[in-house]
C-alpha cells in the first residue's frame, strides 16, 4: 500500500483513522506477558500445539526465529484478539519448498540478491496451524484491520520486509482474506496438515475400519517388527535421560528433510519435558537399551498431535519403525479418549494409508517494498504449488487439487509411493 508523504505515521498502539479510541493495540515481548487464564480462554482447547507451555518452550529454544512477540487488541480493558508473531532476520524462503523448486528459484536469487533469504515476520504458530485468538472464534472487521496494520507496522519498525501469515486453514483464513488482500497480501498454497479421526473403541477396531489393503499392510508391518529380536515399544511419561538420544534421532530425520523452517534443539526438548502442560508422552522404540525411534505425542482436551519423530535409519526400513511408532501413537490416543490425532506435514502417502484426512492450509504473503512484492507474487505461489505437488505425489495432488482438499482418504499401492517415503 502506498502512504502519502504528508500523512503522519501512526504511532504503535494508535487506532487507525476513523476507529473508536476504545480500541488499543499492544505488542508484548513474551508469552509471560500474557496471563495464563486469558490464554487458556482464547486458545483452541483441543490443540496441544497452542498450549501456553509450548510457546514458552519455543521462546527458550533456538529453533529458528530470532525473537517472538504477541500483538494484542483490546477494547477498553477486554482482550479482543491475540496474534503471535516471530522474527527472522534471515528467513530462507527457499526452505519452504523442495529441492527441485529451490533450483527454479535460483535465477530469482541471482537477479535479486537477498530476496530469498530475507528478514521476515511470521504470523501465527511456527509449529502448528495458524489462528487468531479471539473470544468468539472470528475477529470482527475492526479487529482484523487493527491486527494486520499492527503486524505491518511492527515489521517496519523491526526492518522485516516480508510478512507471512503461515498455515491458516480455510475457516481461519476466510474472515481475514478481504482485509489481507486490501493490505497488499497475496495467497499461496501451503502443505496440508494430516488428521486421523478416531471413532473406534480400540486399536483392533481402528484396524478393522481400514480398507482391506491398508489393513493387510498394517498387519504385515507389525509382523515384520515383531520378527526382529530385541525390539520393543514403550510409552514413557518421563524421558529426561533419553533427551540426547532423542535429539540425535531427530537430527537424522531433519538431515533428510526436503523442506525446513524450524529445527528443534536441546533447550526446546528440555522445556517441553519440564512442563506439565501440554500433556506429553513419548512413544519410544528400543533395541536392547538403545533408543532407535520415537514419536513425541502431545495432548489437549480431546485432541492429540504426533509432534516430532526421530528414526535410526540403520534399521528403520527393515523394521518398519516409521509405521510402528505411528500405530503406537494411534493406540495411545484411543486409550487417552481422544477423538482425533494430527501428524506432521510430511510423508503424505503413508499417512493416508493410516487413514488420515488432509487439512488444506495456505500462506498469506506480502513485502513492504512494492517491487519485491511483485516479484514474490509472480514466483512464490507457482513454486509453492509445485512443492505441494511434489510432497503429495502427482496422483494424490491431482485427486485433491480443488479449492477445498478432499477429506476422503486415497489409498495407493505400495509401488506408487515415492522412493524416499518412510516405509
Image (cartoon, rainbow, N blue to C red):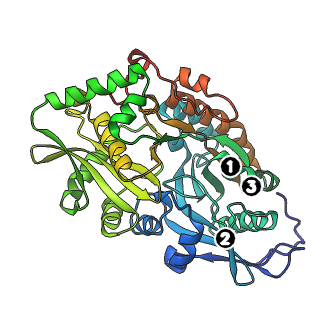
Pointers 3 and 2 in contact (C-beta within 8 Å): no
Residue located 77% across and 51% down the image: 370
The residue carrying mark 1 is 171
Q: Secondary structure at mark 1?
A: helix
Residue located 79% across and 56% down the image: 179
Whether 84 is drawn above or below 377: the answer is below
For the residue carrying disc 3, how many other residues have a C-alpha within 10 Å: few (<14), some (14-19), or many (20+)? many
The residue carrying mark 3 is 176
First along the sequence among labels 2 and 1:
2
Residue found farthest to the front: 201
Report the Cα–Cα distance between label 2 and label 1: 30 Å
For the residue carrying disc 1, how many other residues have a C-alpha within 10 Å: few (<14), some (14-19), or many (20+)? few
Report the Cα–Cα distance between label 3 and label 1: 10 Å
Query: Residue 75, image x and y in percent?
Result: 75, 79
* In the image: residue 164, left or right of residue 237: right
Residue 365, visible in the rendered structure = no
Nearer the viewer's eye, disc 3 or disc 2?
3
Query: Residue 123, image x and y in percent?
Result: 61, 59
The residue carrying mark 2 is 157
- Circle on res. 254: none
Q: Secondary structure at mark 3?
A: helix
Quarter of the image where one finds residue 159: bottom right
Amino acid at each position: 500500500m502506498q502512504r502519502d508523504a504528508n500523512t503522519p505515521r501512526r504511532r504503535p498502539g494508535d487506532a487507525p483513522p476513523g476507529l473508536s479510541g476504545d480500541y488499543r493495540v499492544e505488542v508484548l515481548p513474551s508469552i509471560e506477558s500474557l496471563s495464563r487464564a486469558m490464554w487458556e480462554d482464547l486458545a483452541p482447547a483441543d490443540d496441544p500445539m497452542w498450549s501456553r507451555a509450548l510457546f514458552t518452550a519455543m521462546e527458550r529454544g533456538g529453533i529458528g526465529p530470532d525473537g517472538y512477540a504477541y500483538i494484542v487488541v483490546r477494547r477498553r480493558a477486554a482482550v479482543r484478539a491475540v496474534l503471535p508473531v516471530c522474527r527472522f532476520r534471515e528467513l530462507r524462503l527457499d526452505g519452504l519448498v523442495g529441492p527441485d523448486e529451490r533450483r527454479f528459484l535460483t535465477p530469482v536469487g541471482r537477479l535479486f540478491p537477498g530476496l530469498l533469504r530475507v528478514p521476515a515476520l511470521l504470523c501465527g504458530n511456527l509449529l502448528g496451524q495458524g489462528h487468531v485468538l479471539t473470544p468468539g472464534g472470528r475477529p470482527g472487521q475492526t479487529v482484523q484491520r487493527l491486527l494486520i496494520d499492527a503486524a505491518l507496522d511492527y515489521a517496519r519498525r523491526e526492518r522485516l520486509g516480508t510478512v507471512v501469515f503461515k498455515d491458516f486453514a480455510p475457516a481461519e483464513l476466510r474472515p481475514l482474506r478481504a482485509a489481507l488482500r486490501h493490505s497488499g497480501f497475496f495467497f499461496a498454497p501451503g502443505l496440508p496438515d494430516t488428521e486421523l479421526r478416531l471413532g473406534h473403541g480400540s486399536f483392533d477396531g481402528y484396524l478393522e475400519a481400514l480398507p482391506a489393503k491398508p489393513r493387510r499392510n498394517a498387519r504385515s508391518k507389525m509382523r515384520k517388527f515383531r520378527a526382529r529380536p530385541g525390539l520393543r515399544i514403550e510409552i514413557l511419561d518421563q524421558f529426561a535421560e533419553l533427551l540426547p538420544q532423542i535429539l540425535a534421532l531427530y537430527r537424522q530425520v531433519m538431515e533428510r528433510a526436503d523442506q525446513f523452517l524450524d529445527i528443534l534443539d536441546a533447550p526446546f526438548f528440555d522445556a517441553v519435558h519440564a512442563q506439565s502442560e501440554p500433556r506429553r508422552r513419548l512413544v519410544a522404540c528400543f533395541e536392547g537399551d538403545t533408543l532407535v525411534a520415537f514419536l513425541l505425542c502431545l495432548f489437549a482436551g480431546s485432541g492429540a498431535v504426533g509432534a516430532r519423530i526421530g528414526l535410526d535409519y540403520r534399521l528403520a526400513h527393515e523394521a518398519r519403525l516409521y509405521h510402528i511408532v505411528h500405530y503406537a501413537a494411534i493406540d495411545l490416543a484411543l486409550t487417552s479418549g481422544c477423538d482425533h490425532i494430527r501428524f506432521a506435514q510430511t510423508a503424505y502417502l503413508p499417512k493416508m494409508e493410516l487413514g488420515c484426512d488432509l487439512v488444506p492450509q495456505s500462506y498469506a504473503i506480502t513485502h513492504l517494498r512494492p517491487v519485491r512484492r511483485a516479484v514474490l507474487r509472480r514466483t512464490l505461489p507457482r513454486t509453492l504449488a509445485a512443492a505441494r505437488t511434489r510432497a503429495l505425489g502427482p496422483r494424490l495432488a491431482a485427486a485433491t487439487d480443488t479449492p477445498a482438499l478432499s477429506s476422503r482418504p486415497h489409498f495407493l499401492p505400495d509401488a506408487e509411493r515415492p522412493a524416499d517415503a518412510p516405509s
